[in-house]
Amino acid sequence: MCVRLTGSAPQPATSQLSADSAADTTISRLTASHPATAGSPSAYWRFYWAVAAAQLTRWLPREPGRILDLSGPGFRASSRAVAAGHDVVALLPSVDSAPKRTLTLVNGHAPVRPDRRPGRLRSVVGDSALLSGFASEVFDGVIADNRVLSQHLVAEASLAEIARVLRPGGRVLLCVDSVVLGMAVLAEQDCWPELSYAPNADVLLVPWPDGTITRCFTGEQLGELLTEAGLELEWIKPRTVLSASTVEKVLNDHPRALNRLVEMELKAADSGEGEDVSMHLLASARKPR
């Protein structure tokens, strides 16, 4: 089964698919496998990770604190948080995935803040879905980027653990797969019966070509999930709004336009539009004081 669902009766997905296809005809090509890591050389993924880095920098707390990074080694969240003065505990899946060199402002690709000394980085091996090795209310922030919660099919349990380790007033930043991405992956695999149920599914589980399964969310479902975990939703926005075809054309014609494209993207995402065409959703929530 491609989809597990409960709730309302299925409705045709034709109109949704048409809108998404018109928005970006290249999304199918980009979902043939899991999204690339931060080191991907392609024009679109260089843009994507530059946007992700800028969003993280804007989200990080102003005052130095203790941050738990669950995003894994494929995303440079830890080095940016350290450069901003925070002490970071990076949870890694294995010893082999730990950085071979100490992350610095040079090889970590993180800008320095002239008014602040860098924080400290500590790598710990563990399961990002089970945070039982951490005491309650010890972190000022949790970063769960790089689609980590979509890889935890029982995301409710993972969010409950995140809420537990956050101090009152602490915040979480997370990124998940969207239903738009899930529908594109299903279409690529000719899962047409399952695709007709997808827009109305309470829980959408999507198999990828490599055999793994991820959970996809609408903005409404993600907001409900955070609220049920006892967190106060601050905002939900698309990770990217500009289409891959647009980004690739601009960067191929003007290789130095990356920074301007990132600025355009941040403004577009802040407008609150684009959720229905974004592959991934970004959300921020706070633990009540």
Image (cartoon, rainbow, N blue to C red):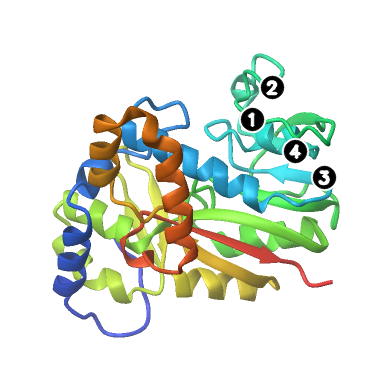
**Residue 195 located left or right of residue 126:** left
Mark 2 surroundings within 10 Å by alpha-carbon count, few (fewer than 14), some (14 through 19), many (20 or more): some
Q: Quadrant of the N terminus?
A: bottom left
Q: Position of residue 163 (x, y in %)?
A: 73, 62
Contact, CB < 8 Å: mark 4 with mark 2? Answer: no
Q: Where 257 falls versus 186 (above or below)?
A: above
Residue hosting label 3: 66
Which residue lies under the disc numbered 2? 103
Q: Are marks 3 and 2 in contact (CB under 8 Å)?
A: no
Q: Quadrant of residue 251?
A: top left
Quarter holding residue 8: bottom left
Residue type, numbered disc 2: Leu
Marks 3/1: CA distance? 18 Å
In the rendered view, does 201 fall on the left or right side of 62? left
Residue 197 position in % (x across, y down): 25, 72
The label nearer to you, 2 versus 1, is 1
Q: Is residue 137 visible?
A: yes
- Separation (CA) of disc 3 from disc 2: 17 Å
- Where 70 sits versus 13, above or below? above
Residue at the top extreme? 101
Determine whether the residue tagged by mark 3 lies in a helix, strand or loop: strand
Q: Which of marks 1 and 3 precedes in the sequence?
A: 3
- Image quadrant holding the C terminus, namely bottom right
